[in-house]
Image (cartoon, rainbow, N blue to C red):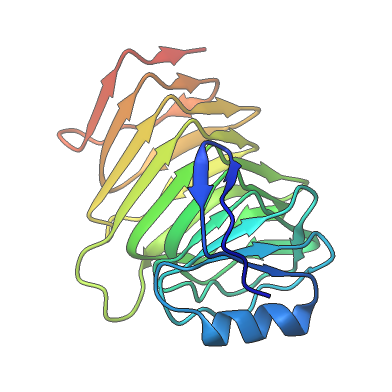
């Protein structure tokens, strides 16, 4: 069902959005979407299909995507979803997309992941439960020449955060690291207004820290 009314949530205004309430209708909506369209996702949907164009998924409060192993987003935006895996790693794949107000929680929140052209995380929460990795990027996805990662107002809750040297640049703004053992990035990394309750292992001439606190 296509609606032509405006919806305002999280300071974002949508029009011409499609509301979906079943897994099948979500797949159909993605298949028929045009670039820039918005799909509003019911909390009853628990699987995230592949996306082949740049669209936005606005997720109803309580939406949980379980056991997501691959993010085929093609630069799309996901708002308000939780990604969980009780037994293993939540995400272990190439990532090219924008995440806002999302949670990633599992034995490892993110491990063996590969960066796409652009990865943006805003107001996101990463939590590892009993594993080792809160956020772990091995390198770039196949065919990607330049890859950039941006974190804004994110929290990393758990032991380890590590980003490989193949990533072009990393930027963290107003992020928090709690209950961790270390943060390590082998890429060019700028940290602004971040709170580190963990050890930092900066690499000479690659890292800058501005207005950050350390405990």
Image location of residue 145, percent across then percent down: 20, 71
Residue plotted at (58% across, 75% down): 70
Q: Is residue 72 left or right of residue 179?
A: left
- x%, y% of residue 115? 38, 63
- Compare residues 99 and 43 and report the one nearer the observer: 43
Q: Is residue 110 visible?
A: yes
Of residues 195 and 41, the one nearer the viewer is: 41
Q: Above or below — where is 106 with respect to 114? A: above
Q: Which residue occupies the extreme front position in the image?
A: 4
Image quadrant in which you'd find residue 44? bottom right
Identity of the residue drawn at 77% across and 79% down: 23
Give the number of callouts: 0
- State which quarter of the image contains the N terminus: bottom right
Please tell me whether residue 27 is drawn above or below residue 167 in the rendered image. Answer: below
What residue is shown at x 62% (from left), y 47% (from top)? 102
The image shows residue 184 at horizontal and vertical percentages of 41, 40
**Vertical relation: 207 (above or below) 77:** above
* x then y, percent, for residue 83: 70, 57
Res. 132 visible in picture: no
* Residue extending farthest left: 205
Residue at figure coordinates x 47%, y 46% from the top left: 121
Which of the pair 201/154 is nearer the observer? 154
Left or right of residue 83: residue 112: left
């Amino acid at each position: 069902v296509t609606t032509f009314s405006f919806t305002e949530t999280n300071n974002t205004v949508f029009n011409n959005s499609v509301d979906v309430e079943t897994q099948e209708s979500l797949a159909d909506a993605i298949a028929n979407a045009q670039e820039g369209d918005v799909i509003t996702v019911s909390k009853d949907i628990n699987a995230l299909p592949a996306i082949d164009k740049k669209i936005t998924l606005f997720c109803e409060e309580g939406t949980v995507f379980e056991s997501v192993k691959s993010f085929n987003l093609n630069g799309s935006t996901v708002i308000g979803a939780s990604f969980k895996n009780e037994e293993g790693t939540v995400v272990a794949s190439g990532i090219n997309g924008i995440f806002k107000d999302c949670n990633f929680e599992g034995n490892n929140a993110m491990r063996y992941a590969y960066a796409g052209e652009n990865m943006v995380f805003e107001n996101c929460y990463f939590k590892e439960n009993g594993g080792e990795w809160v956020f772990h990027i091995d390198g770039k996805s196949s065919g990607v020449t330049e890859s950039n990662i941006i974190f804004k107002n994110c929290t990393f809750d758990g032991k380890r955060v590590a980003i490989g040297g193949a990533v072009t640049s990393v930027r963290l703004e107003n992020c928090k690291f709690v209950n961790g053992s270390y943060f390590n990035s082998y890429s060019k990394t700028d940290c602004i207004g971040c709170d580190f309750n963990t050890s930092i292992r900066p690499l000479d001439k690659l890292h800058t820290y501005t207005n950050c606190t350390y405990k």
